[in-house]
Image (cartoon, rainbow, N blue to C red):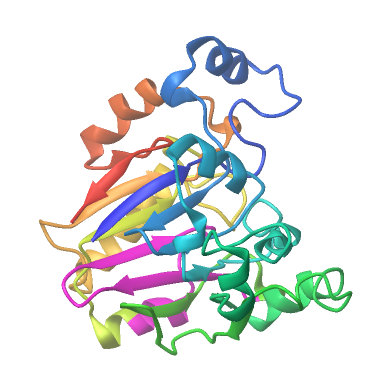
């Protein structure tokens, strides 16, 4: 399986839009891996995770052909992860998916969008019910935590996140039958029902992408609905004790806030010693 990080920041990005804090100033000066857009990822070349406000930039920066994407997983409806109005541009006359108007008139392939009812309802009041998206070639699928479904060639299991309980925020376990990815954004320490699922099913994890909004903070500080290095280590230990993590599992920290105060190089210097990879925009991993 191949994972490409398109964006690796929390909601405000790094540098943050209106911010003059020391890290944002350093990021503007350093550029490169210290410029972080809002979190989004691509699995293989056909499964997209989240659809936030930087999707257009990601398409341009990485030369993506989004007309080839057939499946889209939404973790939750916070604006940095789901910008549904942009999906309206997947219809004529804004897009011709085959490149041929006449052919598109007869065969306009759909995009399958998977999200919880809470996420759909939260965005639906403004967008779906006002008919913004109903004419676009989109098929919305409600998913439930702990109920696997098929998205193209992948089997996907949504799991309960500790992030936004009223709107059913999810993390996703994704497998192609050979490799297994756990994409765990946005969430704090896993809720008990999610840990119980891992205990019962014991999937072998090849790659784990952890929320690390608090960056290299080594203490249990900050809000409970995100993680930091301290909580990443706790969760890695929990998954390893359950037999899901092994010596071959790759553990990666992702989804960083400028409030964590560290540059990419500083994060690498701290986290690699703890056995974690540090994501950056454009990073690719195969496992």
User: Taking the image as drawn, is residue 258 in sight?
Assistant: yes
Q: Does the magenta stretch include residue 39?
A: no
**Residue at (69%, 66%) from the top-left corner?**
91
User: In the image, is 114 to the left or to the right of 190?
Assistant: right
Measured as percent of width and height from the top left, residue 238 is found at: 29, 66
Q: Which residue lies furthest to the left in this view?
A: 247
Residue at 24% from the left image edge and 39% from the top image edge: 274
- Residue shown at the point (40%, 53%) measured from the top left: 210
Q: Is residue 262 at least partly visible in the picture?
A: no
Classify residue 244 as left or right of residue 281: left
User: For residue 254, which quarter of the picture?
Assistant: top left
In the rendering, at what x and y percent does residue 123 appear? 77, 69
Q: In which quarter of the image is the N terminus?
A: bottom left
Q: Where, by quadrant of the figure, is residue 131 drawn?
A: bottom right
Camera-nearest residue between 1 and 93 = 93
Q: Is residue 22 above or below residue 66?
A: above
Q: Eyeballing the image, is 273 above or below 92?
A: above
Query: Viewed as shown, does residue 130 lie left or right of 279?
Result: right
Residue beneath the point at 71% across and 63% down: 84
Position in image of residue 248 (x %, y %): 11, 56
Q: What stretch is highlighted in magenta?
A: 168-197
* Front-most of residues 83 and 192: 83
């Amino acid at each position: 399986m191949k994972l490409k990080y398109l964006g690796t920041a929390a909601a405000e990005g790094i540098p943050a839009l209106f911010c003059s804090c020391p890290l944002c100033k350093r990021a503007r000066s350093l550029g490169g891996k210290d410029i972080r857009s809002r979190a989004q990822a691509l699995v293989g070349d056909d499964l997209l995770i989240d659809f936030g406000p930087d999707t257009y930039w990601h398409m341009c920066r990485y030369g993506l052909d989004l007309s080839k994407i057939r499946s889209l997983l939404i973790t939750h409806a916070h604006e940095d992860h789901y910008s549904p109005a942009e999906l309206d541009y997947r219809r004529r006359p804004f897009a011709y998916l085959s490149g041929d108007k006449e052919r598109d008139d007869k065969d306009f392939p759909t995009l399958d969008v998977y999200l919880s009812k809470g996420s759909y309802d939260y965005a639906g009041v403004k967008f779906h019910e006002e008919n913004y998206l109903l004419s676009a070639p989109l098929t919305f699928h409600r998913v439930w935590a702990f109920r696997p479904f098929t998205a193209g060639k992948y089997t996907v299991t949504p799991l309960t996140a500790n992030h936004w309980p009223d709107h059913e925020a999810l993390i996703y376990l994704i497998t192609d039958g050979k490799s297994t990815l756990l994409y765990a954004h946005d969430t704090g320490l896993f809720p008990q029902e999610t840990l119980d699922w891992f205990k019962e099913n014991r999937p072998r994890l090849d790659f784990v992408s952890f929320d690390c909004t608090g960056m290299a903070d080594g203490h249990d500080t900050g809000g409970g609905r995100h993680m930091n290095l301290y909580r990443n280590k706790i969760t890695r230990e929990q998954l390893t004790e359950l037999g899901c993590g092994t010596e071959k599992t790759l553990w990666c920290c992702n989804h960083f806030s400028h409030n964590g105060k560290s540059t990419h190089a500083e994060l690498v210097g701290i986290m690699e010693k703890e056995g974690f990879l540090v994501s950056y925009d454009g990073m690719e991993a195969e496992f």
